[in-house]
Structures are given as C-alpha cells and as structure tokens.
Amino acid sequence: MTGQFELYNVVLIDSSLFPRTLSDELINGLKSIKNVYVTGTFHAETSELMELLSPADKANCENNLRLLNTIIHPKEMNLSEFPDMNCDVWDFLALSATRPNADKMLIITANQALIQRVVCSRFSMDIYDLNKSCFISHKDYRTLDKEYSVDNNDKPVCDIAFKGLREGAQLYAVRREGKINETVTLGSMLGDGTGGEGNVYHLTGRYSNEVAKILKSGQFPGNKYLVTTEMVRNPRFGAIEWTEFPTGILYADAACTQPVGIMERYTETHSSLYDDELFFGDTGNWSSALLSVRVVDLLYLCKCITRQICFLNMLGVLVGDYNIKNFDYPASLRSAQAGHPQNGVCRYIQMWDSDSFGYNNYFSGYMADVNCKHYDITRRLDILNLCNDELYTFLFQILTLGDNPYNPVTGRFNYEDENYGEYARREFVPKSIWNAFERFFTGKSTSSPQMMLYLLHNELKKREASPEIDITYKDIVGNIDVGFFEEQDRVLPAVYSPALNIFPKSGRVEPQNTVPPQKVAPPQRVVPPQKVVPPQRVVPPQRAVPPQRVVPPQNKRQITPVQPKKSKRGLMIAGIVAGSIFTLLLLILLFFFI
C-alpha cells in the first residue's frame, strides 16, 4: 500500500480522524508525499468534535493528531485569493477538480457524507476511506453512485393497519442487543399525543427508562422500516447521548412480522427551543428581560447544533427537516439564566425524531423547501445540498431571532434591500458569520457545516479573549424604553414575513396587524439617514420629463385635424352650379340695361 501513495502529488487530510488509529502503512505512505495539506477549518473542526467523541474515539483522534503533527507536518491550504470560497474541504476539492492533474490528488477521510458527495460529483481525485482502510478510485465512482440511490418504496411492510393502540397494549420488540420477541407493555401517553407521525408512550416494567413511538397510521413504510432496522443494529448510534436513535422495533405480533413503532431511550430535558419566545420573530414579545440574553449564548447554541450535524454527517446520517420542536435544551441547563445554553454549561443540544433522519438509501420526502430552491430528493447530490442549505437557513433564523432570509414572493435574499423592514436585525449577527450568510443567500458561495462550525468556533474564542464584546441583544437594539416592549397593543410590522413553518405558532397568542414602523427599530439603526432615500435617486433630473417628449414633433400631424379632401365629381358639380349662377346674373343685368 505504501507504494500506491507514490501515485499522488497532493494529499488532503480531512478532520474525521476518530474511527481508528492511522496505520503504520498509511503514515509511511504519507511520508513519501511532499504536498500533504489540511484545510483552514481543520483545527477548529477537530477541537469541536472532540467534545462529542466517546473515550475510545477521542483517544484515536488524539493519537492521530499527534502522528500528523510530529511525523507528517501537513501544511494548511490557502484560499485567500478566492474571497467567495469557503476554506473547508469541499470548496478545496471543487476547486482542485477544475485543475490539471486532479487525478493525482488523494483525499483521506472517514466522513461518509463527504465520500458520497465526491463520488456523486464524479470528481477526478481518489479517496482513501479510513472506515474501511481502502482506496476508492475515481474510475469506480459511476458504479458506486448507483449504491447511493434513494429508495422511494413507501409501501407498508404489512397490509394490516394496527390503529388505536393505547395504554396497556402488549407488543413485541426486536432489540439492538439482539433480543427477539421481547414483550413490552405501553404505559401512559407522553404529552398530549399531537405528534405529527406518531404518539409517544411510556413503557412499563423492565423498559421503564425507554419510550415507545407508535405510528398513527398503524403501518410502517417499507423504506423507513429498512433504515430503522439498520439504525437499531448499529452500535455506534447507541453510544450517542444527544440523539435518541431507535433501540428496538415494536411489532403487533409475536412472530415480529407486523411493525407498528420503535423504542427509544427516555431523556429528561429542560425545555424546547419551541418554548422560547425569543425565536418567534415577534417583536411584540421582545420584553426587556427577554432581550437580556447574551449574543454569546445563541452563538453557543448554534455551535452545538452545527457540530452535532457535522458529527452525524461523518456517520452518513443526513438531517434535512429542521423543525424547532426537535431541539431541546438539556436538563443540565435547569439553572441557567433564561434557559439558554451558556458557554461551558453544556456540550450538546438534545435532538429528537432521529427515525426521520436520512441514512443509507432512505431519506424523508416531506421537508419543505424553505429557502426557495428546488431539490430532486431522488438524487443523492441534491439531498446533500438540501441538508446543508437547510442548516444555514435554520441557523440564520436563530441568530436573527426568528426572521426569514428569503422573500417568499421573489425568492431573493431579504437583506439585499436596505429598506427591508427588518434590516436592523443584521446587527444581531457577528460580521464574519453575516458575511457567510450573505454570500450563500445571494448565490456567491455554497453552504458548508464545516465552515459554519469554524466561524462559530472563532467568534466564541474571540469573545472569550475579549469579554467586553460579550453584549446582550438589548445593548444592540440601543437605548430603548422598557415600556415600549410591554405595550399590549404591539403587533408585527406589515412587511414581516414569518419563517415558512419553521417556527410554528400553534397554541400561542398571535400578533394582530402591524407595529408603528418607528418603533420596530430606532430609525438611526434601521437604515443610516444618508441611505434612506439617496438624493440622486429622488427624481433624476435627466429623467424627470424630457421636454422633447412632451409633444413629440413626429406626432404633430396626428394631433392637428386634417381637412377632408373633395372628390373630382364634387368639384365638377360645383363648377356647373357656379357657372349657371354666373350666367343667370348676366342675363338679369342685360335685361335691365335693354
């Protein structure tokens, strides 16, 4: 294998170094290559992912980093000459694929989402898969692409629909640990039973620390059943504490042929993001106390979400349905101010509804294209792009306190217009992150979870080093009268467009109509006075009313009435009549003279 590395001129090492220790053959092969690189996001990514790794994976990652730093000494790539490109793996690969000798490049990674993306894009570089310790030649991508096809077979596994299951019902489970035909009994329903796909029940007896999710349809779609079975069998998923992957599949019959639901661990949480009025975009609910939340707290929240998505991507798990109800603050935040995650208080955000995650050949098809783009979710590459784009949209809505980046009518980025009614909210977002949002939402760059994690990591480090810039949202809004927020007749501005079902408001007091524009944001903060109406654009002199066009010369003949022309016959008759009269007059005169 060492000799095979000599075929490559450039090697790029990804941050996914945790699955296993780098082999001696791999290290010796890398030593023979002069140009070994890591991305600009590499160090931030590895630092953040360490927080989520199990002790064994963390030991592997630390050992691999030590080997790289002491033996290989990789160089950090530089994309500074391309200002609209991300300094992450994907943009570097996309740029390299356009250059000569791209087939002399090798990417070393264990990131399964990245491998899928390179294969489906048919790039010319080869891959070394750390999961399987093997090379993947770019010549084999066409064959591998077929393995990443999406299974759209949603035909139920069983034709019988088992509806109406309730407390006390006895079901049968197939467990992750290999147990088959385990008897379980449903306990009381968890919550009000208004879940979209299924109802959640406590379990009694030996599995009282778990819950059951029973499908309302009473039937398991075939493609979802297959991916759920694979999740149950995967021991790595069982070790993740912040996402409740299925621990078993529940059946209505002892032969385990009629699936009706899944089992998951029961985890106590502090509260849901859905319970936090700060994210509803409703300025009428922005009390002085609510705006006392620090910017750093929401940056930390976004960092937790982003690094968890990066970790899931490495395992080949894709998330495309960012429902705010599926993210909870951990129970460890019970004493935190305002219930928001604070830097150092927690390491993760609890994620739910894992059975709807995309994995292997399954992907949920019910996500809304909230970012006004069209995706073909039968194609793996579109699915990968959709998931990354949806993450950017979700993070944007959190950091702008519930605003939607896109105009639902035009599909354009709202903040391209300086007269946009919510323009002042851009001040809520640190400049480096805002620039990344702006480049993406205006189509100048791609969305990248790795790049976003890098930016969030750096912004939090900056605030850690300089506590004086750790301010609250009230500080940003400015010197605002507390009573302004507590008026009962406050309503949303007419121009406000709520996020398209991303932040549902069912069960809440809805705003009425509009807020007086001058109170939505202080005028001096919304749009600088000199930019409100640029003088040169009020009535451009050269375009006021061009004099020559008031009555265009060429149109005068159309305006002046034209006398009708007389026909030849009319002239002849007139001549005869005139001649007769003249003759008659002569005769009369002669009569008097004679």
Image (cartoon, rainbow, N blue to C red):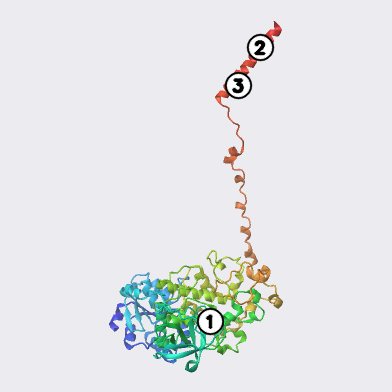
* Quadrant of the rendering where the N terminus is positioned: bottom left
First in sequence: mark 1 vs mark 3 = 1
Seen at 62% across and 61% down, the residue is 534
**Residue placed furthest toward the top:** 594
Query: What is the CA distance from the residue labelled 1 to the residue labelled 3?
Result: 100 Å
Residue 147 x/y as whole percent: 35, 76
Residue 586: image tag: 2
Residue 53 x/y as whole percent: 45, 88
Instruction: Give the image quarter of residue 154.
Output: bottom left
Label 2 crowding class (10 Å Cα cut-off): few <14, some 14-19, many 20+?
Answer: few
Residue 345 x/y as whole percent: 56, 88
* Quadrant of the rendering where the C terminus is positioned: top right
Decide which of 304, 100 is in the foreground and name it: 304
Residue 188 x/y as whole percent: 54, 88
Identity, as a three-letter code, of the amino acid under mark 1: Phe
Up/down of 130 relative to 511, above or below: below
* Number of numbered discs visible in the structure rendering: 3
Residue 574: image tag: 3
Left or right: where does residue 280 sit relative to residue 115? right
Residue denoted by label 1: 327
Q: Answer yes or no: is residue 458 visible.
A: no
**Residue placed furthest toward the left:** 3
